[in-house]
Amino acid sequence: MQEFLDLSFSGVNLIPTIVLLFVMIYWIIVILGVIDVDTLDIDLETEVELDLDGDVEVSGEGLSSVLSFFNIGHMPLMIFLSFLAFPMWVLSLWSTDFIGIDNILLNSGLLVASFIIRLFIAKFLTTPIAKFYMKLRLQDEAVNPIGKRCKVLLTVKSDSFGQAEIKANGTSILISAITRDGLEIKKGESALVIDHIKEGNHYLIEPDN
């Protein structure tokens, strides 16, 4: 037991172990009813803009696009992190113990590589959950998005998905959106939801002229 603890809290294994413990403690607190599962959710609408030397502005739209791609923001953050933390911890321990990799640089590189791989695996595993939460959100608000006006949060194109917001019953509903015929609707512009594409559970929108 002591050897296992020493391995878990040594070298590059320390970070995955801490993340896994954080996830476990979080779920215990949720089960006890102290907090809700969505307490640590990320708001994809938040923009981060930095004025560098008074000239260059860095927007948070790129980061929001990445988070949205990995289903973060469409479902409680801790669900996604749970699908990420445990496998990453197991792989880290396995590489240092079973394979016998004790080189810090090599092990660190493996940890980074496994983290990136696990991000895509976690996206794949959590996609059904994300779709469920998106559908549940719509049902809870009793809103049929078709015919509703929306505001584009992440640029929508005909060849790539974006994100749009529908205001309904005093709350915001986020939908995955796409256009057609080469149209592009930029962030901040208004659009109209005209159809629901069941395959992929996204919505077709067009400019609201």
Image: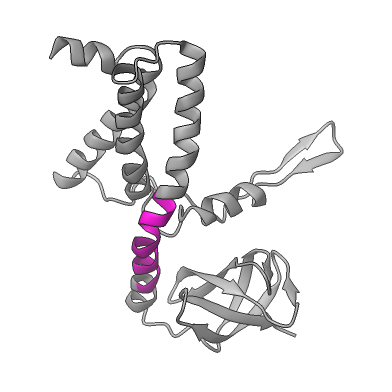
Instruction: Check the picture and name the quadrant holding the N terminus.
Output: top left
Residue 26 picture location, percent across and down: 25, 38
Residue extending furthest toward the right: 55
Left or right of 43, for residue 186: right
Q: Name which residue lies at 65% across and 47% down.
A: 60
Q: Nearer the viewer, residue 60 or 101?
A: 101
Q: How many marks?
A: 0
Q: Name which residue lies at 60% across and 54% down.
A: 65
Which SS does the magenta portion mostly show? helix
Task: Let me know if residue 145 is in the magenta part.
Answer: no
Residue 133 in sight here: yes
* Above or below: residue 112 compared with residue 139: above
* Above or below: residue 194 compared with residue 66: below
Residue 33 in sight here: no
Residue 152 picture location, percent across and down: 64, 68
Which span is picked out in magenta?
A: 122-135
